[in-house]
Image: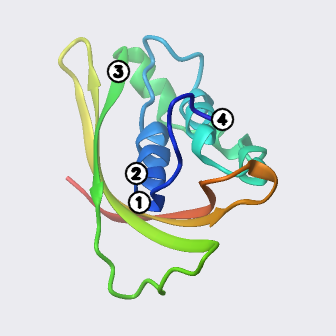
């Protein structure tokens, strides 16, 4: 849980979850899983325990060579296909544009993605919305 954050808006919870996942910084993080560790503040307990894949990001080695961080921009994405909210379930989507930027001026590919979040309210994680599942769809590289 993030102190001072109310978890009242499912769209904001999704945005913060995804922004945290795209917050990798080789200058301060021990590995690629640290960003996921920040994201779990907005996730359900069950999802928080699924961090193994986050440790396997093959780009980390290249980013480390340049002391890179991710320059990421996350904004709401209106998806007409999303089902309506219920009292305890919501779906939200955000658009992500992320580029690895090195201290030495190096720039990696820019990733354009859409992240779909499934959120639930209440239960063992307390009041408010938490991400219980997500999918990242690649929209292209430039």
Q: Is residue 138 left or right of residue 104?
A: right
Quadrant for the N terminus, please: top right
In this rendering, the label closer to the viewer, 1 or 3: 1
Q: Classify 55 as above or below 43.
A: above
User: Element at badge 4?
Assistant: helix
Q: Is residue 89 left or right of residue 108?
A: right
* Mark nearer the N terminus (4 vs 1): 1
* Mark nearer the N terminus (4 vs 3): 4
Label 3 neighbour load within 10 Å: few <14, some 14-19, many 20+: many
- Which residue is found at the position 43% from the left and 83% from the top? 82
Q: Which residue is mark 2?
A: 15
Q: Nearer the viewer, residue 64 or 9?
A: 9
User: Element at badge 1?
Assistant: helix
Q: Which mark is residue 103?
A: none
Q: Which residue is mark 3?
A: 68
User: Element at badge 2?
Assistant: helix
Distance from disc 2 to disc 3, alpha carbons, whole Å, reads 22 Å
Distance from disc 2 to disc 1, alpha carbons, whole Å, reads 6 Å
User: Element at badge 3?
Assistant: strand
Q: Which residue is mark 1?
A: 11
């Amino acid at each position: 849980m993030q102190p001072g954050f109310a978890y009242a808006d499912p769209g904001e919870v999704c945005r913060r979850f995804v922004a945290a996942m795209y917050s990798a910084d080789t200058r301060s993080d021990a590995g690629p899983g640290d960003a996921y560790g920040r994201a779990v503040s907005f996730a359900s307990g069950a999802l928080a325990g699924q961090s193994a894949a986050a440790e396997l990001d093959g780009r980390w080695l290249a980013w480390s060579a340049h002391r890179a961080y991710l320059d990421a921009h996350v904004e709401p994405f209106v998806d007409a296909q999303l089902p309506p909210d219920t009292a305890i379930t919501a779906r939200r989507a955000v658009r992500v544009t992320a580029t690895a930027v090195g201290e030495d001026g190096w720039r990696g590919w820019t990733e354009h993605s859409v992240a779909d979040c499934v959120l639930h309210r209440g239960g063992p994680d307390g009041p408010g919305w938490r991400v219980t599942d997500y999918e990242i769809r690649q929209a292209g590289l430039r």
